[in-house]
Each structure stands twice: as structure tokens, then as C-alpha cells.
Image: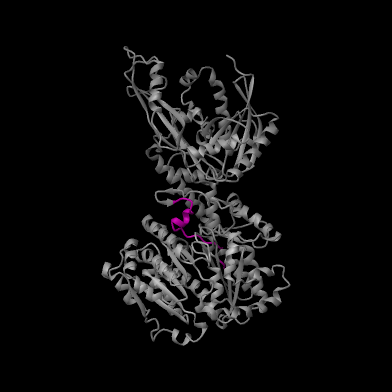
């Protein structure tokens, strides 16, 4: 076990944060780049590791914990775009992966799907990490449609496998990310953008767990929200600044491309929702409330919403909002069966939970929506909720539901894929062709 | 000749955006009088196929009831339009040697050729919907009516349309659920094509594109015959969905934006222009760049037309298609679409309109061409029972149906 190298920032941090161990693992070329980028961002109290089948990429990585997979199969010459080779490479070096994830509570997997190592090894690493009892969250990029149907298919297969073993999978289609950049942007910038989205996602979960909280979300809460595996994950993030920070954040959230993925579009109703708001020292409870109101109205969690509000003194008058939702749609596993409610190792992390409640109670009690703030940690109870498919919503909620169902009648949600020469015609043409479309009118 | 004095027939189109029922009265088997119209917003139908039986049935039944009420009469038989990407076609001619020792073609030869052509077995789960005859070849001469002509080898050319058995029976069950029988089913491209293309165009060669909400149905005519039909599950819904995803709008807003400002081609001044998303001065309204709207729609429409062009291959070239392309269907109303189609396909394109005998103003728009075509088909079907063989032989391109398969 050599997870704690002298360069790792974890040494000092290890004393804090109830001994929670978080590890970010980059798999394959794209994953390695993403982790390298995170290293520059300097997240405290987190281990970083890179996994690859290619010695060359691995040797240039800035990360100290490097795991070489499948030397006996590929001789360190990468998986060559074959997912099967990537999988075999991970399979022969299973023990290395086991060592890497041993004792870790939260594993982030970062990978670019479509290639060999990313598509082949990531699902296996997720499986091993999950078996060792860790909470596994994957952030993966999907290839451009233009890269060809083979890579797409490889990526899709990997995504399905990943969903089986990860507690949450956030997929970022490159097609969509391309929409975000300027026409003059360089290739470097384009890929940096993909990494940026990944780092935004990792950072938001990280800040929830480790930063000074107005309302804390701890690991146990996070875990209880991710009890289901196999479901789709809704992930959105937005920023706002200055006087109209709240309005900006709400508007930007509506514009967040990740909430408009063709596959996620109809998951507007999350069954479990985590809302994290990060703001400067001037963050007020009213602001938090206003944002939360909007988010719950929009994504209306049936079972529960977990709220986190974090203070970052460096942010000034900036606000960032992250919404993570999980649904039971397509889940094959019922929660609680293979998953201990709260592992003994993390018993300490439960402690802060009760203190969060009195804090929220005062400003919110006046509000009719107060029940939305409810934070539930009792994982065992979840089983019941699952069986009776969630309590019937109070009248108000269902009134809201109706017009919304009409709106997103799920245009092509329940239909067969519309394939023509390997492309799904139901996916917007402009996305498949990489045509850049501006969402907003440019100011000035 | 014992024709009933008059018969009330209904034409039903279960579209992706709306369900239309038209009621017509056939007098003496000769004239058609449109006496009722029922419409209902469609639910449970996507890309031309039923995905929710219950919702689809409710809509169709409501529309049927409304149409019957307006007509003040009960529908006696229903003609149903079919669409959806499960409909496929292939051409399989029937070739026979002329039996007569003097090589004169007899009716019996035509019958044998037809049986021969229709004999091809389909894979399990598929069912024939139409056998559309597209002319005869007599010793490599193209002839319309070979009876009495001299020749050795007779080839009856057919375009066979088949569909998924379950999906077809789903559609029939929706009608049966209202307590009615389906007299006949017709694929929507043939129904609408018969309305919007003129006889002269059909003779020259014309392609009719019916761009609906969920599907694009096409039919290709040459020398008065239908020689190709097809369905592509891309339509107006896709345009709306693209806008909604690309501009982060709700479907409802995207749909109204498409109708208000949508265009299939973009122009220079689009760069500066912007359109309000809701356009009702409400809170949360925001300007949308016109260029983005045009780009998204342009990409979708261009792709749709390219796919159609590729599918039809060499059939769509100026020399094969002097009649050009006729656009119909609700989504074909998108401004700029004829220009774009002309550019992509390379033949003249016009918007179709329903024939002059449709006197009702509200029925003149292209979205009703399918139901009108159905009624017209029903009218001709009423004329047929007296002497089916004769009518078939004399009317080139008349649709022949194997309705017994659905009983």
C-alpha cells in the first residue's frame, strides 16, 4: 500500500474530515488528462491516481500514483482502441486495482469512453471498487458522433456496464460540449473544456464534503442518496455573480447543457436530489432558499432533497449551484440489499448530521414547502419507499406535475432508436454534425 | 347492378400530432359528399406508431364520436391510413409465358402473373398491406393494358408494401374498440399522394413528400403508376425536439417558436436578428438568436432530404423526375423548405394543394390530404365490388388490397 506518498496533500488533511478517504482515478488517456488538470486545481484531502495501458501517457502524467495495467498483454503499448483488450488488461491486473481502491470510501472515476482503456477497464475498476465497499461516482465523456459508429457503440456498451456498478454515472457527450465553445477555439481549448466540466462535477461533490458548510452534507447523506445503482444520473451546474447572482444562477441552470442531454431530458423528476450551493461569505439564507425553491419546483424530488450550502471565502459575490439527482428509472437493483446503510468505518461522519437540522429549521419553518428541506439519512427505511414507489405527493405537487408531463411528453422517449447508417436520427442533427449553435444572444 | 343508395364511410388518420376523422357520404357509388370532420390532439402516438394503446384509443374514439355527431349519421365502414417506419416495400415482378398458341394475351395470363408476383413469402411477423401494380411489360415493351396484344413473355410489375403484423393489428384494434370494422387500410403516402399530385404529373414522374409530425411518407409515381413508397420516421416533431434541446426550451415553447420563426434556410441578416422565446411579455422570456433557429432547422431538413435522396438513388434525377417534387403535410409548411429541397434534390419543388373538388375551406390545407385521399380511395372502392376484375384492369395504378389478411 503506497497511497500516501510524500507529495500527496493528504498527509496533513488526513487528520481532519473524519478519516474519509476520497480517491480520484483517471482511466485511459482522457481520464489521465482530466486528473492532471484536477491536480493543478489542488483539491485538498483527496488522493489522485492514474490508470492506463500505455506507458508513454502514464510517464508524462503529473500524478504520483500510477498504475500500469496489462503489461503482460499490451507490453505497455496501449489497448489500441479495443475495449476488449482494455478489459483484459484490467482483468489480469485485478490485484493492482484492488490495492488501489482498498479502504477508499469514495471513488471518482474519470474516463473518456470510446477508446480501449477507457471503455474496457473503467467498468471493471468500478466493479472492483464497488465490491470493496466504496461509493463509486463516474464522470465520463462520450465520443463525438463523427468519430464513427464503432467508437460510439463501444462507448454505449461501456456506459451500460458502468451504470451497473457505479452509484452515479455522469456522462458528458463531446458533441454537446462542442456547443459550448467558440468557433475559433483550438483543439486544446475544446478538450480542456471537457476536463473543466469533469472538474466542476468533482469539485462540487468535493466541496460539499470538505468545505465549511452553512448546511453540511456529509458522506453518509451522500451515500444514502446514491443507494440505487443502474439508474441514470441527472447532473447540472450553474454559476452566477454580482447583484443578480440568484437570478443568474437559476437562468444558467436552465441553460446548462447537461440537463438537456437527449437521454436525460425526461429524467426531470429525480427520485433523490442533492442540491449544493457554494457562495462567498455574504451568502444569505434567503438566497439559498430562493434557489432551492426553484430547483425543487423543477426537479421535484419524490423521496427527498438533500441541501448543502457551503461557504468559500475566495468566491466573493459569486455563487455556484450543483444539482445531482438519481432516479430509479432502469435500475435493476433494489437499494439496501448489497449496500450496508452506513459502514462502520464512517460511523464518525454521521455525527454532524443532527446539528444541521436546527440551523435550517428557523428560516424555513414559515414556508409551506418546508418538507422539501427534509434530510433523511436513515438508509434502511429507503427499502420501504422503494417498494411502495414513493408516497403519493400532496395535492400541490401533483398539480405542478400535470402540465409538466404534457410539456415533456417525452418526445421520443419510449420509441425505438431511429437508426440510419449507424446514426440515431432522433438525436438532433446539429449535435451529430457538430454545428455550433448559440443559445443566447451575445451581449453588446 | 345492385348498389346501395348511399353509404357513409369514414377516413381515419392517426397522426403523431393529431387524429383526423373525415366522414363522407357515397351516393350511388358515384359521388362523394363530405359531411363530417372530427379532430383530436394525438397522445400515445410517436413517429407514426402507437406506443400507448389506451391514450391512442381515447383520442381516436373522441375524434370518431365528434365526426359522427357532426355528420349526424353513423359511419358504416372505415378506411384507415397507416404510417410508421415499420412499413417497407420491395419490388417483385411476376413473369409468365403467354399461354395462347397465337401469343394473344388473355385475362388468365394477367391473373397468373399477378399470383406469381404476390407469391413471395414474407418473414414471420410481417404482413402484406398493398400489392401495387406498376404496369406491364410485354416482351420488354411497356404496356398499360396488354389484353389482346401479342407477345411471348408477360411481366406484371408490382411494388409490394408490407408492415409489422403487430403494429398493423394494433391500429386495427383501436378502430375495432369503437365497435367498427375497418374496410381497408391504405398507407398514408399513397393516400396523400393521390390527392396532391395531378394526373399529368403522375404520368411524367413525380415524388410526393408528406412531411408530418412524426414521419415523412413518400411516394414516387411514373407513367401514372406508383413505383416506390416509403416512410422515414423523421418529421416535424424532430424539428421541435432539436430546437428544444439546442435552445434549452420546453417542447411547447419550441413548437410555437418553430411555427412563428422557423425557417429551413438561413440568410445573412439572421446573424443580427433575435426572436423572443415566449413572445408574450412574460417573466423569463429571453431573446433567441435567429441564426441558431435557422441553423438547427436547416441541419435537420437538409439531412432529411439527403436521406430521402440517397434512399431513392438514381430515381430522383431531373430526367427521371420531370414532374418534380410535391411537398405536403403539416411540417412542410416550414418556410424555405421548397427552396432547400430544390437545392438538395435538384428538381423543381412545389407545395401541394388539395384538388378543386374539396370545397370546404378548412380542408384545403395540406394536413388533410391524407384523409381526403382515403375518402377518395373509399369512393373508388365502393365502385369496385360489381366487377372487380374489370375495374382493376381498366384503371391503371389502382390499388389492390389483400384485406382478407386482416380478418
Q: How is the image coloured?
A: one colour
Magenta span: predominant SS is loop
Region of the chain picked out in magenta, as a range: A424-444
Residue A113 image position (x, y, % from top left):
40, 63
Residue B406 image position (x, y, % from top left):
51, 31
Determine if residue A133 is in view.
yes
Q: Residue at x 46, y 20 (%)?
A: B393
Q: Residue at x 37, y 38 (%)?
A: B314
Residue A47 image position (x, y, % from top left):
43, 79
Image quadrant occupied by the N terminus of chain B: top right
In the figure, residue B372 lies in which quadrant? top right
Q: Nearer the viewer, residue B276 or A90?
A: A90
Determine if residue B267 is in view.
no
Magenta-drawn stretch contains B381: no
In the figure, residue B195 lies in which quadrant? top right
Q: Nearer the viewer, residue A234 or A18?
A: A18
Residue A28 image position (x, y, % from top left):
36, 69
Q: Does residue A165 sit above or below B21 in this rendering?
A: below
Question: Does residue A240 appear to the left or right of A188 in the view shown?
Answer: right
Q: Residue at x 63, y 78 (%)?
A: A354
Residue lying furthest top: B102
Residue lying furthest right: A366
Magenta-drawn stretch contains A442: yes
Q: How many marks?
A: 0
Q: Nearer the viewer, residue A334 or B124?
A: A334
Q: Nearer the viewer, residue A376 or B38?
A: A376
Q: Does residue A176 sit above or below A378 in this rendering?
A: above
In the figure, residue A107 lies in which quadrant? bottom left
Amino acid at each position: 500500500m503506497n497511497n500516501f506518498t510524500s507529495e500527496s496533500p493528504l498527509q496533513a488533511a488526513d487528520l481532519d474530515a473524519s478519516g474519509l478517504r476520497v480517491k480520484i482515478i483517471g482511466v485511459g488517456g482522457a481520464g489521465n488528462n482530466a486528473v492532471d488538470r484536477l491536480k493543478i486545481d489542488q483539491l485538498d484531502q483527496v488522493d489522485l491516481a492514474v490508470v492506463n495501458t500505455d506507458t508513454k501517457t502514464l510517464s508524462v502524467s503529473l500524478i504520483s500514483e500510477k498504475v500500469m495495467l496489462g503489461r503482460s498483454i499490451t507490453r505497455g503499448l496501449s489497448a489500441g482502441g479495443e475495449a476488449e483488450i482494455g478489459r483484459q488488461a484490467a482483468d489480469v491486473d485485478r490485484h493492482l486495482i484492488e490495492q488501489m481502491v482498498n479502504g477508499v470510501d469514495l471513488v471518482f472515476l474519470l474516463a473518456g469512453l470510446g477508446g480501449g482503456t477507457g471503455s474496457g477497464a473503467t467498468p471493471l475498476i468500478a466493479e472492483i471498487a464497488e465490491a470493496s465497499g466504496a461509493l463509486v461516482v463516474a464522470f465520463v465523456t462520450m465520443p463525438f458522433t463523427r468519430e464513427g459508429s464503432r467508437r460510439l457503440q463501444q462507448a454505449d456498451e461501456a456506459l451500460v456496464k458502468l451504470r451497473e456498478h457505479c452509484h452515479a454515472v455522469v456522462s458528458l457527450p463531446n458533441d454537446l460540449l462542442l456547443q459550448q465553445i467558440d468557433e475559433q477555439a483550438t483543439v486544446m481549448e475544446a478538450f480542456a473544456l471537457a476536463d473543466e466540466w469533469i472538474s466542476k462535477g468533482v469539485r462540487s461533490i468535493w466541496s460539499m464534503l470538505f468545505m465549511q458548510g452553512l448546511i453540511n452534507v456529509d458522506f453518509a447523506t451522500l451515500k444514502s442518496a446514491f443507494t440505487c445503482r443502474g439508474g441514470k444520473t441527472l447532473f447540472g451546474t450553474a454559476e452566477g455573480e454580482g447583484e443578480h447572482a440568484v437570478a443568474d444562477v437559476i437562468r444558467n441552470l436552465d441553460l446548462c447543457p447537461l440537463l438537456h442531454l437527449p437521454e436525460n431530458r425526461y429524467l426531470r423528476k429525480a427520485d433523490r436530489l442533492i442540491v449544493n450551493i457554494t457562495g462567498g461569505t455574504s451568502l444569505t439564507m434567503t438566497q439559498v432558499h430562493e434557489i432551492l425553491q426553484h430547483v425543487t419546483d423543477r426537479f421535484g424530488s419524490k423521496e427527498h432533497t438533500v441541501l448543502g450550502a457551503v461557504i468559500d471565502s475566495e468566491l466573493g459575490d459569486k455563487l455556484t449551484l450543483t444539482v445531482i439527482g438519481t432516479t430509479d428509472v432502469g435500475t435493476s437493483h433494489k437499494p439496501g440489499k448489497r449496500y450496508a446503510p452506513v459502514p462502520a468505518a464512517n460511523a464518525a461522519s454521521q455525527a454532524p448530521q443532527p446539528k444541521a437540522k436546527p440551523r435550517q429549521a428557523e428560516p424555513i419553518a414559515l414556508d409551506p414547502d418546508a418538507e422539501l428541506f427534509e434530510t433523511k439519512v436513515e438508509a434502511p427505511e429507503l427499502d420501504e419507499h422503494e417498494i411502495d414507489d414513493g408516497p403519493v405527493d400532496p395535492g400541490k405537487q401533483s398539480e405542478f406535475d400535470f402540465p409538466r408531463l404534457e410539456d415533456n411528453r417525452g418526445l421520443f422517449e419510449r420509441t425505438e432508436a431511429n437508426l440510419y447508417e449507424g446514426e440515431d436520427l432522433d438525436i438532433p442533427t446539429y449535435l451529430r454534425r457538430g454545428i455550433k449553435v448559440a443559445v443566447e444572444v451575445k451581449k453588446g | 347492378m345492385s348498389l346501395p343508395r348511399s353509404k357513409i364511410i369514414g377516413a381515419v388518420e392517426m397522426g403523431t400530432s393529431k387524429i383526423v376523422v373525415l366522414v363522407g357520404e357515397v351516393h350511388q357509388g358515384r359521388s362523394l359528399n363530405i359531411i363530417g370532420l372530427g379532430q383530436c390532439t394525438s397522445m400515445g402516438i410517436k413517429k407514426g406508431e402507437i406506443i400507448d394503446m389506451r391514450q391512442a384509443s381515447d383520442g381516436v374514439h373522441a375524434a370518431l364520436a365528434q365526426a359522427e355527431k357532426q355528420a349526424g349519421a353513423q359511419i358504416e365502414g372505415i378506411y384507415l391510413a397507416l404510417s410508421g417506419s415499420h412499413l417497407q416495400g420491395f419490388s417483385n415482378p411476376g413473369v409468365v409465358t403467354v399461354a395462347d398458341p397465337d401469343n394473344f394475351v388473355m385475362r388468365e395470363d394477367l391473373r397468373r402473373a399477378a399470383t406469381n408476383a404476390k407469391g413471395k413469402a414474407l418473414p414471420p411477423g410481417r404482413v402484406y398491406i398493398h400489392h401495387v401494380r406498376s404496369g406491364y411489360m410485354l416482351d420488354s415493351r411497356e404496356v398499360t393494358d396488354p389484353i389482346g396484344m401479342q407477345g411471348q413473355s408477360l411481366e406484371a410489375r408490382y411494388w409490394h408494401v408490407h408492415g409489422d403484423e403487430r403494429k398493423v393489428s394494433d391500429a386495427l384494434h383501436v378502430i375495432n374498440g369503437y365497435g367498427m370494422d375497418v374496410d381497408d387500410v391504405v398507407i398514408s403516402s399513397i393516400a396523400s399522394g393521390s390527392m396532391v399530385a395531378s394526373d399529368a404529373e403522375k404520368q411524367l414522374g413525380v415524388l410526393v413528400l408528406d412531411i408530418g409530425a412524426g414521419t415523412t411518407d413518400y411516394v414516387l409515381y411514373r407513367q401514372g403508376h406508383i413505383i416506390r413508397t416509403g416512410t422515414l420516421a423523421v418529421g416535424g416533431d424532430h424539428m421541435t425536439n432539436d430546437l428544444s434541446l439546442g435552445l434549452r426550451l420546453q417542447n411547447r415553447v419550441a413548437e410555437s417558436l418553430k411555427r412563428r420563426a422557423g425557417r429551413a434556410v438561413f440568410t445573412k441578416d439572421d446573424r443580427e436578428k433575435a426572436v423572443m422565446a415566449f413572445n408574450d411579455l412574460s417573466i423569463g422570456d429571453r431573446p433567441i438568436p435567429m441564426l441558431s433557429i435557422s441553423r438547427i432547422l436547416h441541419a435537420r431538413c437538409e439531412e432529411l432530404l439527403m436521406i430521402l435522396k440517397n434512399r431513392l438513388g438514381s430515381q430522383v434525377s431531373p430526367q427521371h423526375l420531370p414532374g418534380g417534387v410535391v411537398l405536403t403535410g403539416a411540417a412542410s409548411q416550414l418556410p424555405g423548405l421548397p427552396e432547400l429541397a430544390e437545392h438538395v434534390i435538384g428538381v423543381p419543388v412545389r407545395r401541394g394543394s388539395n384538388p378543386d373538388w374539396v370545397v370546404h375551406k378548412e380542408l384545403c390545407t395540406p394536413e388533410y390530404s391524407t384523409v381526403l385521399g382515403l375518402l377518395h380511395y373509399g369512393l373508388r372502392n365502393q365502385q369496385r365490388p360489381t366487377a372487380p376484375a374489370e375495374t382493376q384492369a381498366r384503371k391503371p395504378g389502382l390499388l389492390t388490397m389483400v384485406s382478407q389478411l386482416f380478418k
